[in-house]
Structure formats: C-alpha cells, structure tokens
Image (tube, helix red, strand yellow):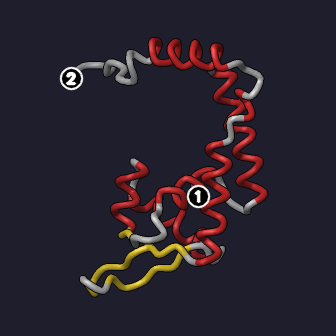
C-alpha cells in the first residue's frame, strides 16, 4: 500500500509541478468552489490545517493569479477567496490529475472489484479505530 501511495504521490507531484503548484497548493485550489467564494478559515477547516498555513497557500495561489481575496459582500470585515478564470482552468486540471486512474489501468474489472473490497476490509470499512487513549 505504501508503494502504491508513493507512486500516486510521485505522479501527482510531477503533474502539479508542471502547473507551478505544490501538492498542498493544488489541494487547496481543488477545495475551493469557483461558484461559491469561501473565507480562508473555512478553507482551513476543509483542509484540516491551521489558518496560518492556509494564508501561505493562498498567497501562492494569489501570486499565480489563480485566486483573489475579495471583501465579502455580506460582511465587509471578512475577505473571501474567489477562484479566477485562470484558476478555474488550472483547478479543472488539478481535479483531472487527482482522478487519474492510469495506475490501475492494467487491472481487469474483477481485479478492481477485488482490490476495492480488500482496501475496504483493511480500512475497517472506511472507519479505522482511533489510536491511543480516548
């Protein structure tokens, strides 16, 4: 599983680099809905990271012309993140890269079904037990 993950990360990382993005910036861009501007704090929640990290990611996306910070029309104290026209194009490519299944293209439908079932089983049905004291 670690080998598959490494292969996916390598392929995605190379494709993101061609777009001028780091994997973290690509993920942030993917999380932004072009039709619904979002405050940076909400993006931080979606990414599961600190707001200061999101600030750095958004700075990079803004410098690349993919995102703009705009005043929220409903709350002028707040800034929202708006995906630009170029950002929409790059975001579509990011989604395409993240959905690329060429790594699995050599598997038959039966093998894909078996793989899906096995991954589901080893991940405890998608809900692994928590570790450590509760």
Q: Nearer the viewer, residue 127 or 35?
A: 35
Which mark is on residue 53? none
Q: Label 2, secondary structure: give it.
A: loop
Residue 33 appears left or right of 86? left
Residue 52 appears left or right of 75? right
Q: Nearer the viewer, residue 121 or 19?
A: 121
Q: Is residue 19 above or below residue 106?
A: below
Which comes before the other along the chain, label 2 or label 1? 1
**Which residue is at 54% across, 19% downward?**
116
Residue 64 appears left or right of 48? right
**Which residue is at 34% across, 61% downward?**
42
**Which residue is at 35% across, 54% downward?**
45
Q: Is residue 42 above or below residue 100?
A: below
Q: How many marks?
A: 2
**Circle 2 residues within 10 Å: few <14, some 14–19, many ≥20:** few
Q: Position of residue 24 (x, y in %)?
A: 57, 52
Q: Name the residue tied to disc 2.
A: 134
Q: Label 1, secondary structure: give it.
A: helix
Tell whether label 1 touches label 2 (CB within 8 Å): no
- Considering the image in quadrants, where does the C terminus appear? top left
Q: Nearer the viewer, residue 14 or 32?
A: 32
Which mark is on residue 25? 1
Q: Position of residue 46 (x, y in %)?
A: 38, 52
Foreground tag (2 vs 1): 1
Q: Residue pushed farthest left?
A: 134
**Gap between marks 2 and 1 measured at Cα:** 33 Å
Quarter of the image for residue 127 reads: top left
Q: Nearer the viewer, residue 56 or 6?
A: 6
- Considering the image in quadrants, where does the N terminus appear? top right
């Amino acid at each position: 599983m670690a080998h598959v993950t490494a292969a996916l990360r390598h392929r995605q990382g190379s494709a993101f680099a061609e777009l001028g993005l780091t994997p973290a910036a690509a993920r942030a861009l993917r999380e932004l809905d072009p039709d619904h501007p979002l405050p940076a704090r909400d993006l931080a929640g979606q990414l599961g990271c600190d707001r200061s990290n999101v600030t750095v990611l958004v700075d990079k996306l803004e410098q690349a012309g993919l995102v703009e910070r705009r005043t929220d029309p409903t709350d002028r104290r707040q800034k929202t993140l708006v995906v630009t026209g170029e950002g929409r194009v790059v975001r579509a490519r990011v989604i395409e890269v993240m959905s690329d299944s060429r790594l699995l293209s050599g598997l038959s439908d039966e093998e894909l079904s078996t793989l899906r079932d096995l991954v589901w089983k080893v991940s405890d049905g998608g809900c692994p037990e928590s570790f450590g004291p509760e």
